[in-house]
Image (cartoon, rainbow, N blue to C red):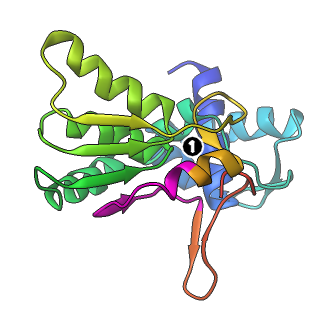
Amino acid sequence: MLQETRLHRISALLATLDRITTGHISEALRIYRETARRDIIALEAQGILRRVHGGAVAVRPASEPPLAVRSAVRASEKRAIVRAAARLLQPGQTLFLDAGSTTTMLAEELIAMAGLTILTNSLDAARKLAAAGERAPCPHQITLIGGELAPGGHASIAATAIASIYRYRADFAMLSPVGIDAREGASSYDHQEA
């Protein structure tokens, strides 16, 4: 694995966990501990983290890593979530699908099904679902929710998107928030996206 790829993956892990051990990096990336230590030193030089005994802590305020990076982090766990979520759905139902790395994987899984009405603000999920229609008739009715384009160009957000969502009723909403608190509910880095 190239160092650049490792550094991106370590940064994504750190964004998710806020503190990470050398052993966790070594196990997650399947690299030697010494390689993980060198990568931590490189990321510290970039100002992304601060070395501590046994690992590293984030130094920058939390911000969401790019979608491509998030897609690689905990991919096997996300696949398990996606399979479980897809089993809840039946033809004829309406699904609201938000934008995120896990929900984009869910869109890929839904290609094997048919007969759903899918409402989404995710350009990536809509593209994946629509691409299935290039080989054969699209198995679902897909509605892309309008709104302002989010930074990074992966989703529609803000007041226009919210107004569009209120026009529909869905049987399920499959969301991918940044965090969940038992009292405060779901959270995001970006107020407009939340």
As helix, strand or loop, the secondary structure at mark 1 comes to helix
Where is residue 102 drawn, in percent x and y?
41, 47
Q: Please tell me which residue lies in front, 106 or 34.
A: 106
Where is residue 93 drawn, in percent x and y?
19, 55
In the image, residue 123 sits, relative to residue 34, either above or below, namely: above
Q: Does the magenta stretch include residue 177?
A: yes
Range shown magenta: 164-178
Q: Which quarter of the figure has residue 132? A: top left
Q: Which amino acid does label 1 sit on?
A: Arg
Is residue 126 shown left or right of residue 189?
Answer: left
Q: Mark 1 points at which residue?
A: 33
The residue that appears at 46% across and 29% down in the rendered structure is 124
Q: Please tell me which residue lies in front, 19 or 155.
A: 155
Is residue 115 shown left or right of residue 70?
Answer: left
Q: Can residue 61 be seen in this view?
A: yes
Is residue 1 shown left or right of residue 113?
Answer: right
Where is residue 9 drawn, in percent x and y?
58, 37
The residue that appears at 84% across and 55% down in the rendered structure is 61
The residue that appears at 62% across and 22% down in the rendered structure is 3
